[in-house]
Image (cartoon, rainbow, N blue to C red):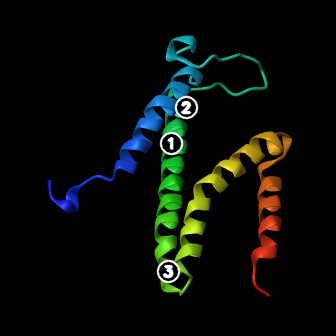
Amino acid sequence: MSARHQVDPTCFAIAAAYLLIGFPIHALLIPGSTKQSPHPVIIETRNTAELRPDTTNHLFLLIGAMLTILALVVSGISVHLLNVLKQLGTATAVTLAIGMVIGPSQVAARLAEFSIGRNLHPTWSARAGVLLLLPLTEN
C-alpha cells in the first residue's frame, strides 16, 4: 500500500473499542422486534381518532427523513466549522479544541434534556438553550 492510503492505527483502535464496548451495549439495550406487536394497537373510544396503517407509515417515513436531514446538517456544520474558524484566523489549538467539544456537548445536551427537561415543553428547553448561549454573544 502506498503511504497515501495507509490507515492510522488510531482508527483501528477506535473501531476495536466500538466493537468491544459500544456494540455489546447496543445489543443489550435495544429491545428486540419480537417483543413488540407488528401492528399498532388501536383502542376504540368515541373521542380518539383511529390510527390508520397507511398514515402511520407516512408519518414514520417523514420523521425518519427529518432526523436524517438534521443529522446531515449537524455533521456538515461540525466538519466545515473547523475550516471556517481556521480561515478566520483562530489559533489551531483553539480550533481543534472547539472541534473536540462538538460531540460531547451534543451528548450533554441530550442527557440534560432527558433528565432535567423531561417534563418541560420543548419550547421551554429551546428557550433555556438560547438563554445559555446569550453570554457567549458579542456586545
**Residue 17 bears which disc, if any?**
none
Name the one closer to the observer, 94 or 119: 94
**For mark 3, does the 10 Å Cα neighbourhood hold few (<14), some (14 to 19), or many (20 or more) residues?**
some
Name the one closer to the observer, 13 or 38: 13
Image height check: is 131 above or below 125? below
Which of pointers 2 and 1 indicates the residue nearer the eye? 1
Image height check: is 36 above or below 106? above
Q: Residue at x 58, y 54 (%)?
A: 103
Q: Secondary structure at mark 2?
A: helix
**Residue 64 bears which disc, if any?**
1
Residue 106 pos. (x, y %): 64, 53
Residue type for callout 2: Thr
**Residue beneath label 3, please?**
86
Name the one closer to the observer, 83 or 61: 83
Name the one closer to the observer, 27 or 8: 8
Mark 1–mark 3 Cα distance, whole angstroms, equals 34 Å
Q: Residue at x 59, y 74 (%)?
A: 94
Q: Answer left or right for 125 relative to 84.
A: right
Q: Residue at x 21, y 57 (%)?
A: 5
Which of pointers 1 and 3 indicates the residue nearer the eye? 3
Q: Secondary structure at mark 1?
A: helix
Query: Which of marks 3 and 2 precedes in the sequence?
Result: 2
